[in-house]
Amino acid sequence: MCAGGILKALRATFCHPDRVVSIHPCVYAGMPLWLKCFFIIRLSLRLSMVKITGKKRHSIRKSQIEDLFSSLEREIGESASLFRGASVELLETSSGEILYLIDRKPQLMQGDGFVFPTLKGLLEHPFPERRVVVDAGAVSFVINGADVMRPGIISLSEDIVAGRPVQVVEERHKKPLALGMALFDSREMRERKQGKVIKTFHYVGDDLWNLEF
């Protein structure tokens, strides 16, 4: 085992915690098992912290724009018109998400079988459809990515459909906190007293919110 090589790798690891340290195969082979595990765990944690970035970006055809807004209208009705702009671009991210830039702003996102406004789109163009309002006690949990539980909900719109996206807003100013997938229709969600009712997939401060492009 090359003690000098191992010492060099350890020094680089602790002096530069934000850097993925390269280790020569010969040095790695000579490491004890506990040290190999250390570097594997560290690399896994580092990779999990990689930010989402823009990968491919291009304008879309007029026919594609109309298809896009038809899909959006199926989710939020007439409020879809709020998101029309002079230009529409498709942005593919490094993690595979598809966003649509309206006048260069990431206002729409494409999910599995749906198109829905992003949180930044909601901030610029608030609308009443597919809305769930949570109380102040739920805010700190929702903005950290927690799923929405029934006790934290104080009101919801009548158009919520199980398996379709919804916006989650706070009680006082109606500012958007998260987007999630409804697990129940409006009626059943309202009748429930306990348990998870919305599965969160996008929230303030997450990688999609902090997207760089």
Image: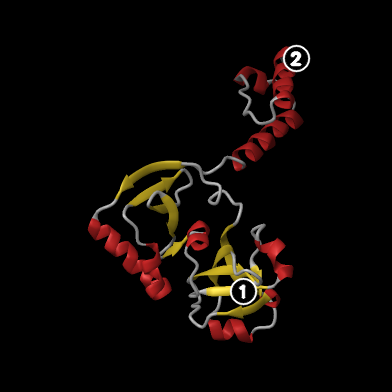
Residue 130: x %, y % from top left: 50, 74
Residue drawn at point x = 74 percent, y = 20 percent: 11
Query: Which three-letter amino acid code belongs to the residue tagged 1?
Result: Val
Sequence-wise, the earlier of marks 2 and 1 is 2
Residue carrying label 2: 3
**Res 133 label:** 1
Residue 97: x %, y % from top left: 45, 51
Answer with left or right where residue 111 lies relative to residue 85. Answer: right
The relative height of residue 92 versus residue 123 in the rendered view (above or below) is: above
Residue drawn at point x = 69 percent, y = 83 percent: 193
Query: Which three-letter amino acid code belongs to the residue tagged 2?
Result: Ala
Residue 64 falls in image quadrant: bottom left
Residue 15 falls in image quadrant: top right
Answer with left or right where residue 33 lies relative to residue 79. Answer: right
The relative height of residue 209 versus residue 55 in the rendered view (above or below) is: below
* Of the pair 7 and 107, the residue shown nearer to us: 107
